[in-house]
Image: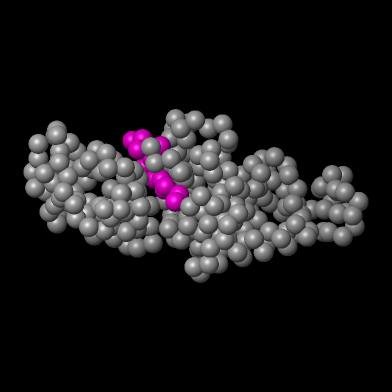
Amino acid sequence: MSRVYLRFYEELNDFLPIERRKVEFEHTLNRRTSIKDLIESLGIPHTEVEIILANGRSVDFNYIVQENDRISVYPIFESFDITPLLRLRPKPLRNPRFILDTNLGRLARYLRLLGFDCLYRNDYEDGDVAEIASQQHRIVLTRDRFLLRRKIITHGYFVRSVHPREQVKEVLQRLDLYRSIAPFTRCSRCNGTLIKTSKDAVIDRLEPLTKLYYNDFRICLSCNQIYWSGSHQDRARQLISELTSQNDQRTKN
């Protein structure tokens, strides 16, 4: 057996028991292990980690832990330039595309409302999510930390809040997404791209009052859902303002 000493910083402490948060603690190893396996054995998904220092030196996930190592582990820093240090993931996905697990359907709809490309189905298996994320270079959003331990997932975030509106604020803040917001450009139902269309092109599908009072329309390229600037869009604008407010006020679904 060998002893190592670990310290986790900032949001990574969310995954630790209270007595191990924000302090250096001793841990005993029973076998030869990589730093990645050690970190995940403590309940922290590798996708949450950006920098690891072993005895003050930057190391990658393949580093084999040694007797008496002092290890410092830091979370993702999407909003900061830390290129002088070793990044453990491929470069950040600055044109973010997401895939969400089955527990985050409302979050998916809210993010689509803000213009983000979000794949979601309520029948996704964990293997489906991991495979799609790997093939399409998507960020996994999940409340299942074990899903994020799959090796083929390189970008992922464990959503802390259980309330959908709080989840939106959390994701926007943590991944520094405010400059990427583009409301009313995604279909909230299917995730397709919305484009402007003429009234004449959709008039046969409109209700009488809609034909009479509205002239500006968008249509989804994937499912042909029609959108227009009615009272429902006024409510959506109010919701968008609430979701994107950069203050500490918390709202619940």
- Residue beneath the point at 58% across and 35% down: 122
Which residue lies most toward the front here?
19
Magenta stretch holds residue 176: no
Q: Position of residue 63 (x, y in %)?
A: 17, 42
Could you say which is closer to the camera, residue 189 or residue 167?
A: 167
Q: Quadrant of the C terminus?
A: bottom right
Could you say which is closer to the camera, residue 6 or residue 153?
A: 6
* Colouring scheme, one of rainbow, by chain, secondary structure, one colour: one colour
Q: Position of residue 241 (x, y in %)?
A: 61, 65
Dividing the picture into quarters, in which one does residue 46 lie? Answer: top left
Could you say which is closer to the camera, residue 252 or residue 56?
A: 252
80 relative to 205 in the view: left or right: left
- Residue beneath the point at 64% across and 61% down: 239
13 relative to 53 in the view: left or right: right
Q: Position of residue 19 (x, y in %)?
A: 26, 53
Could you say which is closer to the camera, residue 30 or residue 242?
A: 30
Per the rendered image, the range of residues in magenta is: 147-160
